Amino acid sequence: MSLPPLTAEQMVRPRAFELRMSFIYAAGFLSGGIHLPYLPLWLEANGLGPEQIAVILGAPIFLRGFTTSLITAFADRARDRANVMIVLAGGSLIVSLGYFLDHSYLTVLIVSLLLAIFMTPHATVTDSLALSGVRRFRSNYTSMRIWGSIAYFCANFVGGLILAVAGVGSVPIMISLTFVAWLAATLFAPRLGPPRKAMPVPDVSLQKVDDALFEPRLLLLVIAAGLIVGSHGFLYAFSSIYWRSIGLSSPMIGALWTSAVVAEVGMFLAFNRVFGRRSVGMMLAVSAAMSIVRWCLYPLVLPLGLGTVGFFLAQSLHAFTVGLMLISLQKLIAESIAEEKTGRAQAVAYFANGMAMAAVTLISGPLYQRFEQNGFYVMAGVSAIALGMVLYSRRYPHKAGKGG
């Protein structure tokens, strides 16, 4: 699909574009580095039970599956996506102050739902702005995006150190401060104007491409990837609570979360050498199999006397259960879907991943309430279903698209 030519104004490169985008990525990912590992600890400290914690963490995932696409579509029609980023950051900061109100279940749930609306779209809107720079000025996307990952695991580790000194009550303060940093960074966001719009040309292949989205092999693999993602719901909701219950310190919990992100980045760096020539089915099978191993390992660490080394080993498998899965999913879409329809395919995959994660997070509350760390075995069962779907997909021939 052809694009209109760039105007002279659109060809003007904003000053220090890559540096400014790097700051936005770093500041934007700080909040997730605090919110994901430490909010469950704060919820538990305020007297909320596992089932309530699961709803507070799971319901926003359902909501953001619908609101994120609407907000990103609005951003593409705005006069400048930088303005949308400022609104998202400012809205996140204002909503996060609700955590300082009374800590009742209903209040915290409402705040978390509202926060999901403002907080979640930041990555896609930032990516959209950065990729415009890549297309127009040949900027290096990786050199900008990597600062988001670096900031994320730094927040994991430093957050644990702060909790050790200031206590769990500092979690809302840290979350709000990360939004202050994000808002400050967005105020210096490069101004690129609205994105170029595709020219309205006939799309005679629409039906064929829509059929490709629901081709049995593709659908099986997309759902399998969603189940692999969803199996992490129990980990994200209750691993910090579990580690605290067995006496691990806040800095150690932060280090465990950090090690998972480091392992994921390691997979990104090593992928081409190790898996570059492997099929999507084979990579997803490895991801699902390693998920089974990972979830079976957590409950066995203490009985086997492995100590924190065992937990670090389990966290290192994040490279396969998340890193490899994400790359496999993108490769699947590139191989199977025509380029002009990859956005729709991404939306289908995002929806499948989000709904699976939300559903598993919601059932994680009753699981942890009844079985505690043994609930990880249920996650192994979810991953086993994913592995079965990947293997079953081999019955259907691969129909290559035009993704390239």
Image: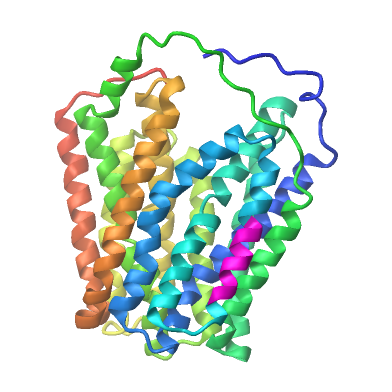
Position of residue 37 relative to residue 192, above or below, is below
**Residue 241 locus on image (x, y percent):** 39, 81
Residue placed most toward the observer, 404 or 63: 63
Relative side of 372 to 98, left or right: left
Tag count? 0
**Residue 321 locus on image (x, y percent):** 36, 55
Q: Residue at x 24, y 35 (%)?
A: 219
Position of residue 94 relative to residue 72, above or below, is below
**Residue 282 locus on image (x, y percent):** 29, 39
Residue placed most toward the observer, 317 or 336: 336
Secondary structure mainly formed by the magenta segment? helix
**Residue 271 locus on image (x, y percent):** 48, 43
Position of residue 300 relative to residue 232, above or below, is below
Relative side of 118 to 25, left or right: left
Residue placed most toward the observer, 72 or 34: 72
Q: Is residue 309 visible?
A: no
Most distant residue in the right direction:
15
Quadrant for the C terminus in the image: top left
Q: Is residue 140 visible?
A: yes
| Magenta-drawn stretch contains 91 | yes
Residue placed most toward the observer, 202 or 342: 202
| Magenta-drawn stretch contains 359 | no
The colour scheme of the drawn protein is rainbow
Which contiguous range is marked in magenta?
89-98
Hey, which quadrant is residue 207 in on the image? top left
Q: Residue at x 62, y 45 (%)?
A: 126
Hey, which quadrant is residue 312 in on the image? bottom left
Q: Residue at x 71, y 26 (%)?
A: 136
